[in-house]
Image (spheres, helix red, strand yellow):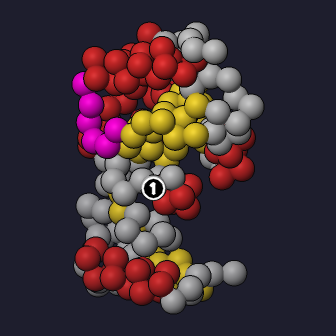
Amino acid sequence: MPMKLLFPGISPRALGLVLFLFTFCGINATFVVPQKRLSRWVCSTRANAWQHPRTPRSSLTMIAKSGGKLITTSEEYGGQVLDPSINRPVLVFFSAPWCGPCRLSNPVVKDVMKQFMDDINVVEVCTDDLPDVASDAGVMSIPTIQIYFKGQLLDTIVGCVARNVLASSVDKILEDYVSSP
C-alpha cells in the first residue's frame, strides 16, 4: 500500500526531484499536490511522468484505432513481437502521449501501416506504461520505430521520419527477408 504524501507549495521541478529520489530508493508513494498551487501540470506516481492536463492519453492509440495493436504488457510484447514463429515483419512504434514528435510520427506510421496492411503487423508501445520493455529493446529516445522479423531486430529508426523513408525501409525488409526463401 503506497504512502500518501501532501506537498502544498512545491514547484513541479522540486516535486520531480522528490519523485525521482523516492523511486530510486524503492519507496512506493503517491504524491498529492493541490491543483490551486500547481495549476498547469498534473503528476502521476511515476518519476518524470509529468503530463499537461490537456494532453489526451487517447491520442496515443491512433495506431491501434487504425488496425494496429497497442501493447499493454511485457508478455504481450514477447508474444506479438519477439516470437520467432511470426512469419510477418512487425513494426513496433515506441512513443508517449506527451511527446510532440511522436504525435507528428503517428500519421506517418498510420499511412505506412495502411500501405503494407497485408504484409506487416504494426504494434504500438507506450514508453510511459512499459518502460522496462522500452529499455530492453534499447530505446533511448522517442519516437523510435523498430522492425522485427521472426523475433530478430532488423531496423531501427529514431526520431521523426518521412513517409517515403519508412515505406522504403519496410519495402526493403519485405524484399530481403519475406520474398526470399
Residue 119 lies, in percent from the top left, at 56, 14
The residue lying at 66 percent from left, 52 percent from top is 74
Residue 47 lies, in percent from the top left, at 43, 72
Q: Which residue is mark 1?
A: 138
Please determine whether, in this image, residue 69 is positioned above or below residue 118. Answer: below
The residue lying at 70 percent from left, 29 percent from top is 86
Please determine whether, in this image, residue 28 is positioned above or below residue 101. Answer: below
Magenta-colored stretch includes residue 139: no
Callout 1 environment at 10 Å: few (<14), some (14 to 19), or many (20+)? few
Please determine whether, in this image, residue 35 is positioned above or below residue 55. Answer: below
Q: Write the start and end of the magenta stretch as one range.
A: 157-162
> What amino acid is labelled 1 in the image?
Gly
Nearer to us in this view, 133 or 146: 146
Res 60 → quadrant: top left
Q: Is residue 6 visible?
A: no
Residue 167 lies, in percent from the top left, at 36, 18
